[in-house]
Image (cartoon, rainbow, N blue to C red):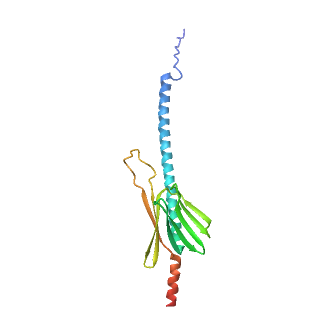
Amino acid sequence: MNKPKSLNFKTPKGVSLIENLLVMSLMSVVFMVSITTLAFLMRVEMKGTTRIHETLNLQNLSHQFREDAGSAQNAVVIPQDNNTSSELQLDMGMEASIVYSVNKEGTLIRRLKKQSDKIIAQNEFRIPVESLQFEIEKTNQRVLVSMRFRIDPEETHDNQTVKKPGRTFKLESLIDQKHLFHKRSETAKSN
């Protein structure tokens, strides 16, 4: 008996050119979407980090300003030439003073501690400030000093007719707060 010959049909191995092109185009779409998403997430993260740093700088400035004003014996506002900013000089006693001002570019608020007109310490609070104004108000034998500044919005809108409002901050503190309690206790003891 003769064995019938078996027919071996070979199935093609590999992929066609059209299948390769289809896979490559799908992969490029996936890569494009993932890169766009990654760029967006990085931009959001950078804005968040910037906002956190700005908030921390505002908190540090607020704490330092209130502490300095509470320790000061006297305060003087020095107007600047541009009328949008002023300087505050706090007299700390014993020829020491602290001066608050904004730099010319408006990118930071500077605190200088001076002893006999020599700078012994300098702090910079990186806050983009449009204007910096100081005010001194005297009421009921107390002196209230305030710092008011405006921060521009971080981003501008593509449509120039839309303008995001900036934020205005006001820090206040009583001058000579630490010595005020000592004076009250001394007058209460003497009476």
Is residue 61 positioned above or below 178 on the image?
above
Is residue 173 positioned above or below 191 on the image?
above
Pinpoint residue 45: horizontal percent, then vertical percent: 50, 49
Pinpoint residue 149: horizontal percent, then vertical percent: 46, 61
Residue depicted at 56% across the width and 68% down the height: 98
Residue depicted at 55% across the width and 66% down the height: 99
Task: Identify which residue, 98 or 181, lies in the foreground.
Answer: 98
- Identify the image quadrant of residue 116: bottom right
Residue depicted at 53% across the width and 65% down the height: 100
Q: Can residue 60 be seen in this view?
A: no
Of all residues, the one furthest to the left in this rendering is 161
Of all residues, the one furthest to the top in this rendering is 1
Task: Identify which residue, 5 or 161, lies in the foreground.
Answer: 161
Residue depicted at 47% across the width and 27% down the height: 22
Of all residues, the one furthest to the front in this rendering is 81
Pinpoint residue 129: horizontal percent, then vertical percent: 48, 57
